[in-house]
Image (cartoon, rainbow, N blue to C red):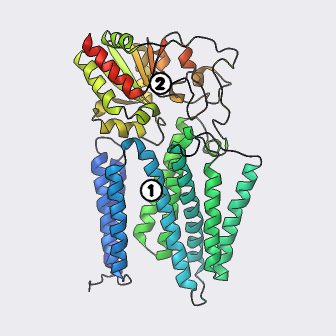
Amino acid sequence: MIAALSQNTVNLAYLVAAVCFVVGIRMLSSPRTARVGNVVSAAGMIVAIVFTLLLESVDRYAFVLAGIAIGATIGAVGARTVRMTAMPQMVALLNGAGGGAAAGVAIAEFDRLTRFGGTPPGETAAAIVTSTVLGGLTLAGSVVAFGKLQELIRGRPIVFPGQQVVNALVFSAAVALAVISAPAGETWLLGLAFVVAAVFGVLFVLPIGGADMPVVIALLNAFSGLGAVGAGFVLDNNALIIGGALVGASGTLLTLLMAKAMNRSVANVLFGAFGQIQTSLGERGEVEGTVRATTPHDVAVQLSYSRKVIIVPGYGMAVAQAQHDIGALADLLAEQGVDVKYAIHPVAGRMPGHMNVLLAEAQVPYSQLYEMERINPEFPQADVALVIGANDVTNPAANTDPASPIYGMPILEVDKAASVVVLKRSMNPGFSGIDNDLYLDPKTTMLFGDARESVLHLITAMKDQ
């Protein structure tokens, strides 16, 4: 029999856990301290879990430990087997799992409180409603986001006439069912509210294009945190309230920052169906030019005679899993006396910090990674800007074409470099549905093919010189 602790002792442990959460999140803001920050946050969670299990109200340890074992096994296997390039998909699923767990706790507690004809107090009922609706929305929406990121569902927005009206009606129905279930004391009504909220989650994410996935992932992360806050109030658990509030707040701030990085409002991201209509090079009368292809040998010569090269990684690098080979190419250039830097756009890839994560895996020195505001002034001094699959974040139409859907979006100004080399599979526009005017610039040459194979050919060509 495990000795139970007083609530005050457990609350003190929760305070320690909360400090670990705050310090850990703060350390995650820098690549140099992110690894330690992750450990600190995990330590805080362990403290919270252990002391929760020592509460007098906790029993049936066999079930609890079985759940921990199952969850830990899934987490450990996922962490060891999921490639870094698939991390956005994993984050989407983790967001969904968090939301689903919060909803499950709320529904189970509601069933316990109403099983013998009782009704939950008003504040508890409000928390149950919040967790159920947000949990269903987050779970289903995250699954759809996973499908888009995994390309099981097409990345372009999926829309139909009257979609916003239908979405509003479905969401209203979910809230109404959840609210009605409280005084009625009917668990099946709350379960139905969860299902309807899940339907809304699907409808909510379908019209959002793949290019906006960083914002969607951050928003779903915020929803999962708010759902956890509701579950914390349902269980009267301070650690769950604090942890959920931190996730909700950080996810909300990240959502706003991601939208700002694209010079768009959150409402436009969520309801604008960005990327629905594909625009092609040459459709606009003012866009004229010729796409010029090049060879690995020519690019190798160009790089070898450069003084400064700026590498611009994008989703094409992630898909091809080329980060290690790009790191090797950069090392080879550095050995020849070339100044090499990486330009990182905040929404490059399919989740916040996607490029930083991949390059960190490839052991790229942190000192070579430059954020957009710091690197843009250096492009005019660069001999070559080497773009690996980045599309919208390098499109000069954002600065020059008021008719472009991305006009006003802050971009990496690669067009100001002396020469631009783009590694790309084809001229297809990608998730956003918008072609890149950069490809018609006389300074730009295209090295077509798989990014990893192209980089390997470049390394071979440079060594053969």
Identify the image quadrant of the N terminus.
bottom left
User: Quick check: marks 1 and 2 in contact, CB under 8 Å?
Assistant: no
Q: Mark 1 points at which residue?
A: 94
- Quadrant hosting residue 77: bottom left
Inspect this view and state whether residue 238 appears. yes
Q: Is residue 92 left or right of residue 56?
A: right
- Residue type at the position of mark 2: Lys
Task: State the separation of the CA atoms marked 1 and 2.
Answer: 31 Å
Expressed as whole percent of the image width and height from the top left, the position of residue 16 reads 31, 65
As displayed, is residue 102 above or below residue 300? below
Expressed as whole percent of the image width and height from the top left, the position of residue 225 reads 48, 60
Marker disc for residue 424: 2
Q: Single out the mark in the foreground, 1 or 2.
A: 2
Q: Report the front residue among 138 and 66.
A: 66
Expressed as whole percent of the image width and height from the top left, the position of residue 395 reads 55, 24
Expressed as whole percent of the image width and height from the top left, the position of residue 339 reads 30, 18
> Going 42% across and 40% down the picture, which residue do you hit?
354
Q: Is residue 353 left or right of residue 199?
A: left
As displayed, is residue 146 above or below residue 420? below
- Residue type at the position of mark 1: Leu
